Amino acid sequence: MPNFWSRLRGQLFFQICALMGIAFLLVFAYTPMVGIIIAFKNFKLSSGIPGFITSEWVGFKWFAEFYNDIYFWQIIRNTVVMSLLKLVFTFPIPILFALVLNEVRRQAMKRSVQTVSYLPHFISWIVVSGMIFSFFNEQTGVVNHFLVSTGLADKPISFLSDPAYFWPMAVLSDIWKEMGWWTIIFLAAIAGVDPALYEAAVVDGASRMQRIWFITLPTIKGTIIIVLILSIGNLFGGGLGGSNFEQSYLLGNPVNNGVSEILQTYTLKMGLAQGRYSYATAIGLIQSVISLMLIYLSNYFSKRFSGIGLF
């Protein structure tokens, strides 16, 4: 049996890759967590790095201040509603799209549609927001031009400034950008289904819908649940790879601020714009704690009712 060092030499490439991943997490994920301490201190930038240690302890002062903030309930409502809307509408669509693509028999068309659908994932939200501004501009946007010229609207609609349109635009743009990317995971899961099951179902006279319902969906149930748990854990961050922060920051403006302001943008405003680092850290920590609770709860209920969980 090879000893430890000979096995290590045989796996040298993979061990280096693993070490690079661990180093990345240590530098960019765990080391910055030391800064959480200033959420419980009266930290001022003028005190420099030593201020992390020497600043006065204030306990839960900043958490209480945020709870008493006049914008507290508005920000919580916006964060929760926007996150839930994106989860409800963006989670099932990649599954449905994968099921439809799997039924396409012409491989060339299937690959073309799949490629076109996941390309938007590689476009940054900066570019996407620019496209949204171009398409939905009240004066020059092609959407308003089409609606008015065809008589579907009496006058141009303020898609970009009317608060009523912010959440629908955030959800629809998220679906367009991320649907194809997450479809890849479900298509990969469907590819692992034993073809003999489909052949047996065809012999028994099962229709296409019955094969999807009784073979495909139960087989990929584990993948669906794992992705759902991850989405719930990242609910306040944007769910399936989307970004609540970038959408709210780029598409938000003073007119729709009442629905576009969320925890992440408020944290940025308090931290970088107003220099209230301790207060901003406390707000960010609240979001992190809630996200941690969500992933534990979703994992617990998933294991309880389906027997499938992350840990």
Image: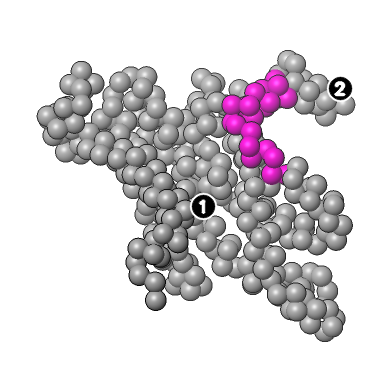
Between 275 and 115, the one nearer to me in the picture: 115
- Above or below for 21 versus 119: below
Report the span colored magenta. Answer: 117-137
Image spot of residue 142 (x, y percent): 78, 23
Residue drawn 59% across and 26% down? 126
Judged from the image, the secondary structure of the residue bearing numbered disc 2 is: helix
Circle 2 packing at 10 Å, graded few (<14), some (14-19), many (20+), is few
What's the amino acid at mark 1?
Answer: Ser
Most prominent secondary structure in the magenta stretch? helix
Residue drawn 66% across and 53% down? 184
Residue 270 image-quadrant placement: top left
Q: Where does label 1 land, which residue?
A: 231
Between 243 and 121, the one nearer to me in the picture: 121
Q: CA distance from mark 2 to mark 1?
A: 41 Å
Q: Where does label 2 land, which residue?
A: 149
Instruction: Give the left or right position of residue 160, taking residue 254 as reference.
Output: right
Quarter containing the N terminus: bottom left
